Every structure is written in structure tokens, then in C-alpha cells.
Amino acid sequence: MANKKTVSTAAKEQVNKVLSQAKESLKILEVARTFVKLPSNPKELTNEKILASLKKLGVATQEEVQSLRARVEELEATVANQSARSSDRVINDTLV
């Protein structure tokens, strides 16, 4: 019985997360509408128009976000390596 409750709670949390994301997307589109002249008829909206509007607002593309994530991971690895080498030097200096 507890397992069903956990699954139900997890499902509710997932639904709430999706709804929250949808509401946030609507807010972004409303803000975009104020800055960029979008057609009032949703049928006139095309992906190209939406992408152009979001680009004008400075919203990053999925590709740009993935590139940034990769760069952050790369930088984190560099920092971790430098930190490890620094720790090794301290240990070696202590032993000498």
C-alpha cells in the first residue's frame, strides 16, 4: 500500500512540475508578445517566428545550453585536477 502511495505522490509531483513548466512557458510567451509583435491568432505562429522572437529576447537555444553545460563540466574537471595536484604537493611537501 505504501508503494502505491509513493507512486501516486511521485506522479502528482511530476504532473505539478509539467504544469509549472507550461505556466512558465506561457508567461515567457506573454512577455515576448510585449517586446516582439506576435500575431494575435495562434494559427499564424510558426516555429520560425517563435524562435526568432525568443532569440530577440536573448533566450538560449538547447544547443547553446548543451554547449555551456559541456564547457562547465570541462572547467569543473580542470579545477578538480588542479585541486588534486595542489593537495598532492602539500602532502609531498609535508613528507619532505
Image (tube, grey):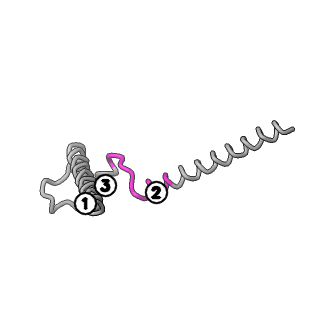
Name the outermost residue toward the right: 96
Name which residue type carries label 2. Gln
Do the numbered discs 3 and 2 sit on residues whose CB atoms are within 8 Å? Answer: no
Q: Which range of residues does the magenta coloring cover?
A: 56-69
Quadrant, the N terminus = bottom left
The chief SS type of the magenta part is: helix
Label 3 Cα crowd, 10 Å radius (few <14 / some 14-19 / many 20+): some
- Judge from the rendering whether residue 41 lies leftward or rightward of residue 27; answer left or right: left
Name which residue type carries label 1. Ser
| Residue holding disc 3 | 52
Residue 8 visible at all? yes
Name which residue type carries label 3. Ala
| Residue holding disc 1 | 8
User: Quick check: is 66 in the magenta stretch?
Assistant: yes
Q: Position of residue 66 (x, y in %)?
A: 46, 57
| Residue holding disc 2 | 66
Say which label, 3 or 2, has the lower sequence index: 3
